[in-house]
Image (cartoon, rainbow, N blue to C red):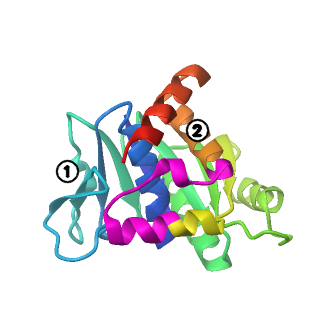
Amino acid sequence: MNVVFLGESTEAKRFLILCLAKIASCYANITVLSKKPYSYGEITDEYEYCGIDFVLLKDGENPLSKISESAGNFVDAEEYIDVPEDFKVIAVSETTRDKLESCIELAGEYTRCHPSLNLYIVYLNIMEYCRIGKRFLSSFWEHSLPSTIEIAGTDEIYFEEKNHIVMIESQYLNRLSIRSLSLPIKTVFRNIILYIFSLDTKEVKAVFKRAERMK
């Protein structure tokens, strides 16, 4: 299964993809492709971080040329690439105005080439008590996209302190503990994994149990 994650490759977005790759690796082999390094220190074009295989893309390099045929591929895309129809597309939409509009503009490029695109949207870094939440952002997206686009689902992520701790510790320890994440973010991850692999609820629960036992 191949997935393109649209949006600026921020630290929060990279952590989101890393967590999803870690969980998904309990169901299938996963390779993450990105122009920005996820690991810290010296790395090669192919490296391992938190138990996940990564490919570092060069400027101007087509990610499709690096797709692994023996694994599922998660592509961290900050710009348009002409992906095949069988790729899943997830827009990672952060709430600041510049990142939101940048992500919508990028999604718009995909919709022009794939007018019947099936799009899943994740609202990242929703702020508690802020009026700009899931309902407002969904309305913003719906007015910006062509009516032919099917929004397969939307989820919102509040980056609680507990999850920030896991993110920072993983950067220093090269180890990611899914068990230590908050329940709300794990619920969103279950929804996304279900969407990516078209699993049923029982299968997703089994995948998460395996992921939570991993060190």
**Label 2 sits on residue:** 190
What kind of residue is marked 2? Arg
Q: Please identify the quadrant where the N terminus is shown.
A: top left
Residue 118 visible within the image: no
The mark found on residue 116 in the picture is none
Q: Is residue 180 magenta?
A: yes
User: Does 80 sit left or right of 135 as displayed?
Assistant: left
* Region of the chain picked out in magenta, as a range: 166-185
Q: Residue at 70% of width from left, 60% of height from top?
A: 144
Q: Residue at 56% of width from left, 59% of height from top?
A: 92
127 or 83: nearer the viewer: 127
Q: Residue at 68% of width from left, 50% of height from top?
A: 184
61 or 114: nearer the viewer: 61
- In the image, residue 205 sits, relative to residue 160, either above or below, namely above
Label 2 or label 1, whichever lies nearer to me, is 2
- In the image, residue 150 sits, relative to residue 161, either above or below, namely above
Q: Are marks 2 and 1 in contact (CB under 8 Å)?
A: no
- In the image, residue 198 sits, relative to residue 50, either above or below, namely above
Specify the farthest residue to the left: 44
Q: Is residue 59 magenta?
A: no
Q: Position of residue 177 (x, y in %)?
A: 45, 53
Per the model, the C-alpha gap separating discs 2 and 1 is 27 Å
Residue 106 visible within the image: yes
Q: Position of residue 156 (x, y in %)?
A: 69, 55
What kind of residue is marked 1? Lys
Toward which corner of the image does residue 63 lie, by quadrant?
bottom left
Q: How many other residues sit within 10 Å of disc 1, few (<14), some (14-19) or many (≥20)?
A: some
Toward which corner of the image does residue 171 lie, by quadrant?
bottom left
**Label 1 sits on residue:** 66
Q: Position of residue 165 (x, y in %)?
A: 53, 69
- In the image, residue 15 sits, relative to residue 69, either above or below, namely below
